[in-house]
Amino acid sequence: MPLRRISLLATQSGHDRFAVADAALLARKARDAAANPRRREIHRFHASDGASLHRMINALQPGSYVRPHRHLTPPKDEAFVLLTGAMGFVAFRDDGSFGAEDCAVLDRARGVLAVDVVAGVWHTVFALVADTTVFEIKPGPYSPVSDKDFALFAPADDDPGALPYFRDLEARFRSLMGLPPLSW
């Protein structure tokens, strides 16, 4: 399947009728994510930002900070289906707090393969192991102005406080979910 680079963070399929997500594509996106300073990459199957349904492979490496956000205006549900690796998911309360009941570990060994997020719920995801890939689905169209609201309780990606915040978040998640701590 031909791939076209559409940004520093994404590639796109060049299919006319259908495309598959095979092991080679997942491995390539995992390598791309490992080489990307943000430690993640997307491969998009939809033809344009204006598509009514967005379908993509999201490849994440450990240490990739996805700032907590929600899809409220317009309201958009979002789903993640685990393909490889293991992923942490956190749904936050409006004040940024969360407990074990707000978390999920997507991991084949645990039998948890997908999470569906209702529009307007603050959330984040992160790779628990190297070469994690998920199939992500949400309604389009995409507009950089209104696609997501970023949580004010979490620092921006380029903020010096982002890495300490993310480390604390993952450490708390791991503790709540009975996972071994990381040696950052």
Image (cartoon, rainbow, N blue to C red):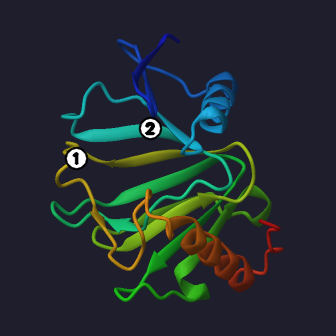
Q: Residue furthest front?
A: 160
Position of 136 with respect to 77 (left or right) is: right
Question: Is disc 1 placed on a helix, strand or loop?
Answer: loop
Q: How dense is the environment of label 2, judged by Cα within 10 Å: few (below 14), some, or many (20 and up)?
A: many
The answer to whether any part of residue 121 appears in the image is yes
Q: Do the numbered discs 1 and 2 sit on residues whose CB atoms are within 8 Å? A: no
Question: Quarter holding the C terminus?
Answer: bottom right
Question: Where is residue 136 shown, x and y percent of the image?
Answer: 46, 47
Quadrant of res 120: bottom left
Position of 17 with respect to 58 (left or right) is: left
Quadrant of res 95: bottom left
Q: Which residue is mark 2?
A: 56
Name which residue type carries label 2. Answer: Met
Q: How dense is the environment of label 1, judged by Cα within 10 Å: few (below 14), some, or many (20 and up)?
A: few
- Residue at the spot x=32%, y=76% of the render? 152
User: Could you give the CA–CA distance between mark 1 and mark 2, rounded to whole angstroms?
Assistant: 17 Å
Question: Where is residue 171 shown, x and y percent of the image?
Answer: 69, 77
Name which residue type carries label 1. Answer: Pro
Q: Which residue is mark 1?
A: 144
- Residue at the spot x=19%, y=45% of the render? 143
Question: Is disc 2 placed on a helix, strand or loop?
Answer: strand
Q: Nearer the viewer, residue 153 or 106?
A: 153
Q: Nearer the viewer, residue 29 or 103?
A: 29
Reply above or below: 131 against 178. Answer: above
The answer to whether any part of residue 59 appears in the image is no
Q: Nearer the viewer, residue 113 or 172?
A: 172
- Residue at the spot x=44%, y=58% of the render? 157
- Residue at the spot x=34%, y=69% of the render? 118
